[in-house]
Image (cartoon, grey):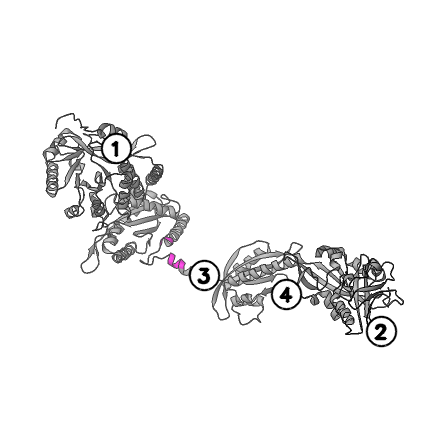
Amino acid sequence: MGLSVVKNTPRNTVILDKAGIICDVHLNLSRSEDTLGWQGEECLIGHSYMDIHTFHDTEIAPIYDGIRSVLAGKRDCFSRRFVIFGERKSLTYELKAEHPDLDDDHVELCYRKVAESLSTEEELLKDTNINEMLFKQIGVGVLFQSNNEVIVLANNTAQRILGMNQSAIRKVNRDNLPWRVVDAKGVPLSYRDHPGVTALRTGKTQHNVVLGIANVIDRYTWLKVNTEFVYCAKTGERQGVLTSFFDVTEERRTKDAIQSLSDRFQVAIDSAELGVWDWSPTDALMIWDSKMFDIHGYGEDKTQTPMGAWRRSLHPEDRRLVFSRLKELLKGKNSGSIEYRLIWPDNTVRFVSSQARPIRNLSGKISRIVGVSRDVTKEALAEKKLRELAYTDPLTGLASRAGFYSRLSEEIARADTYGYTVGVLMVGLDRFKDINENYGYEIGDKVLKEISSRLLQRISDCGFAARTGGDEFSIILPQLQSTDVAKSEEAVKFRASLILHGIVEPLLLGSGFVINISASIGVNVYPKGGETATALLQHAGLAMHHAKSFDADSVLAYSSEMTARLHKKFNFISLIRNAIKNQEFELYYQPIVDLSDQQVLGCEALIRWRGADGKMISPMEFIPIVEEIGLIYELGCWINRTAIKQWHLWAQSAPDSPLQYMSINVSPHQLKKDTCVQEFIDLVNEFGVAPESIQLEITEGTFLSEFLDADSALKRLAKNGFRLAIDDFGTGYSSLAYLKRFNVDVIKIDRSFIIDIEHDQSDQDIVSAILAMNKKLGFKTIVEGIETEAQARIVKSLGCDYVQGYLFGFPDTSENFAKSYVLPERLVKLKKHI
């Protein structure tokens, strides 16, 4: 393809008048409509010169400015080249505007095709090496731009990547950019910075340029771009630039993801203060990061070779351990973490934790060991200190529970080896809680220290003592020579008695202040009493708790029956928990009778529990356990609600009933709750019951509780109208001052004074005295446990007002009680006159 100007090229001429209107036309191209888009001479005459230029060209404004300047006489001549894009051709024309033959009234526009500007695509592909280059780069996008920066060609891959067909791509220019282009860092690029344009303007090819092209939804396609100039095969002149590119979006995303992961990993490494190392066993090469030098004490000296520094730093006593782990790794075993010691250049001992894994090459062989290390000196020293603390009781200086278990395990192993038996004692101080509460914790601590000292004196060097609980001590009597377990047990019991005798002597705490000490000891022997340290101590403790239920200062040996009883108790506790959860309890009601007319004035709500076998379980069995496991408050709330609700139902069904009140037993644990008083108030308000109709019974022992003060629950309950009764009177140590202080209404004499009242004059005297005292103080009295007419007659003769007992009615269900006693004017019918 020649690039020289074709001589005698036919011209197309348009004559304009001064107003710019076409007055004459000369067209010499047979197919001019294919290029300039004109359909004939007659179609042009009478139109403005601006109406005939319907082609697209970025230089249209400068062309019109030039024509206007010639029409206005500001210049004699104007010329300009422009490009016309056809369906099959892209041609360059030269436009020249001048006055014809010195005619100032007209301007001649001459359009001349310039052959070297552009040929048809077919000729271009035929006469250049573009076809060959496109073929070689068929897998990449290819654009060809002419010297005047016009995109002429785009291969299929380019069209696919750019999302545009060739016709649309060819219309792209600096004023019509459908993309936003950024560089590799995301900085926007101007048109002149596009690789192809840069190459054309600077004459330098561009290589491996990464840029991003954003579409309408602002998603970037990342490309790697290269440019090469295209030259004419005949003349060697540059024809344009070939831009090749391929999509690296996924590659960039992967790279970004890897970099992000690497950044996060490095942050994690830095935060965890980890050193990273890489060891190649084949060439004994070890690579460290900078943190590894710090860990090994060479922070300022990076000239040390890692392998040499590592070998020099290893503690001699830990070398075998470290090398053993490395051998395991070389065999493909992930041996987990390992802790060992280093010796720094300044002889400081440091503790290091390392973890590594083997890396295999393509052939599957282990080629490297990669790992991380961390200085754990602070943790190791703290753990050592904690271990010492864990094995020592800080108050007494004796061994702790952990120390005791450790020593007992050692003695068990030794006993198995040499055929010994081992004695285990658990010493529990009786009522030590009372010492803390009455004298203060400082005194309590002094007692514990003194007991510890006495224990050490008694066992001397033939035993091992530990404090294994708040007020509990445990002793090991090791290497008992007798293999006869029964004889060993008797020997241990004898030693326990001697120890007990030594520690229960009165304790003098200065200024003549003396505390009497009482203790119980449980005895156990290995191997009879358990095969492990845990079992031995547990069974010794079980024996000690059983000893506490006997006389003070008792020694008791463990037996398997104790475990059986304990399991029975645990099963019973489980049944109680389920009973409370499933509301298996019932309330029975027993009448309270006025002796003067034998009329039922009230009743007492009594809790009952029927077992799975249908038999009743005594409250004396389950109430103490309910208190022990901390569920008495929950059970008490159920009793209160059920009883008050029943009283409400009776009041509705029999408004004229002679019953005046219902008595409900209240546990001290309930009274300790801050919400106790309000809960009772809320219940009577909820069911519309008068507080005066609810009598709350509190055992006499409750008055000894420390929580009873001027603002106690009892005083507030009395102020809110509830009746207060003291139950089991005569069995405790209540103060008469307390009875007056809390506005007690009723005193209930315990049945223990009634059982033998027919034959025991002293019982009659006690009851008579209590009745007299109550009458003088203004208290009403109820005598409990009346089961015979003779008992009823005696207490009536002594001046008793009210009674309660089997003679007048057994506790019964709410339905049966209502049938017998709730009806108006119902009188109790006795078998005999009293």
Picture coordinates of residue 367, whole percent (x, y): 63, 58
Q: Which residues are magenta?
A: 386-402
Marks 4 and 3: in contact by CB < 8 Å? no
Q: Which comes before the other along the chain, label 3 or label 2? A: 2
Q: Which comes before the other along the chain, label 2 or label 1? A: 2
Q: Quadrant of residue 175?
A: bottom right
Q: Amino acid at mark 1?
A: Trp
Picture coordinates of residue 124, whole percent (x, y): 83, 61
- Structural distance between the alpha carbons of marks 1 and 4: 89 Å
Q: Residue at x 15, y 38 (%)?
A: 781
Q: Which comes before the other along the chain, label 1 or label 4? A: 4
Residue closer to the observer: 194 or 384 = 194
For numbered disc 2, what is the local secondary structure?
A: helix
Q: Quadrant of the C terminus?
A: top left
- Structural distance between the alpha carbons of marks 3 and 4: 49 Å
Picture coordinates of residue 418, whole percent (x, y): 40, 49
* Camera-nearest label, 3 or 4: 4
Relative to 17, is 256 on the left or the right?
Answer: left
For numbered disc 1, what is the local secondary structure?
A: helix
Q: Which residue is mark 3?
A: 379
Query: Is residue 389 one of those drawn in magenta?
Result: yes
Q: Which residue is mark 2?
A: 102
Q: Which residue is mark 1?
A: 650
Q: Which residue is mark 4?
A: 187
Query: Is residue 21 one of those drawn in magenta?
Result: no
- Marks counted in the figure total 4
- Structural distance between the alpha carbons of marks 2 and 4: 56 Å
Residue closer to the observer: 154 or 394 = 154
